[in-house]
Amino acid sequence: MTKQGPRPRRTNADLVESGHRGYFPGMPFIIDQTICRTDNVAVLVHDPASGETIAIDAPDAEAIAARLRERGWRLTAILNTHRHHDHVAGNAALKAATGCTIVGPAGEAEAIPAIDGAVGEGDTIAFGGTTIDVLETPGHTMGHIVYRIPSENLAFVGDVMFSLGCGRIVEGAAEAMWGSLAKLAALPRETIVYCGHDNTADNGRFAVTVEPHNIDLAARVAEVAALRRKGLPTTPTTIGQEQATNPFLRAGKRRLRRAIGMEDAEPAAVFAELRRRKDAFA
């Protein structure tokens, strides 16, 4: 694939606008977000050159099928991040209707409906003249994986990380979840991140209780409120933005540790405390 040189630096407003339209400067793909169920995000990635379209998870077959019809796209594959019903519920119906291939995490393959292939850390998937890398990110579920397109600085993170938040620890321990978040935090700052749920507003209400003096966080919360008033999505986000504002990625930062009275604690212990507080947050 021919690269088009460095892309201009994006502001938060640019990112949200580009994400809403599905177009990013210099990127060969069109990305479509559809909210379904309650706050699940069904993400479609379309490559106009090849005609291929992938869905990252399949929360609702009818909602995804309707969006495919509106776009005039043909679904060729579903890439599941983990086994939870609100991410795989549409698998079987969409496969029956389109003949698409379904790929999922090797660690949860037996729980992925209609799966055709299982992948794990270091595996790659061909798509639209480039490749999708697979990262293992246990914690929310032990088999959870993330799909990343390095050539375009894109990551599809399912429920391991949200905008201003992260998923609950359903399986395993806090140490595993912290390790997965640290792996994502180490990606390039400009990486565009699509999450499995659009719950930024709720996450922001919690985030300001543990880091009330973070001016970047305050600005992000205000931005999210403005987007909600307009009926617009609050994702995608970027790794850089999350490093600056997401408390769960900031468990190693002295300022946050001091704010919650854990200045000398290890990051994994700070993360565990943050997750405990979020679980109890009304």
Image: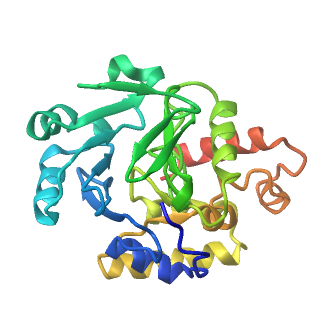
In the depicted structure, whether residue 76 falls above or below residue 104: below
Image-based side of 170 in relation to 75, left or right: right
Whole-percent x and y of residue 132? 48, 45
Image-based side of 24 in relation to 135, left or right: left
Whole-percent x and y of residue 255? 82, 63
Image-based side of 47 in relation to 161, left or right: left
Whole-percent x and y of residue 74? 17, 52
Q: Residue furthest right?
A: 264
Identify the coloring.
rainbow
Dividing the picture into quadrants, the one containing residue 116 is top left
- Residue shown at the point (62%, 36%) measured from the top left: 177
* In-front residue for pair 137/256: 137
Count of numbered badges drawn on the protein = 0
- Residue shown at the point (42%, 58%) measured from the top left: 199
- Residue shown at the point (42%, 69%) measured from the top left: 234
Asked whether residue 149 is in view, the answer is yes
In the depicted structure, whether residue 177 falls above or below residue 165: above
Q: Residue furthest front?
A: 2
* In-front residue for pair 99/239: 99
In the depicted structure, whether residue 265 falls above or below residue 26: above
Image-based side of 227 in relation to 173, left or right: left
Whole-percent x and y of residue 231? 29, 76
- Residue shown at the point (76%, 38%) measured from the top left: 269
* In-front residue for pair 192/202: 192
In the depicted structure, whether residue 88 falls above or below residue 189: above
Asked whether residue 85 is in view, the answer is no
* In-front residue for pair 265/246: 246
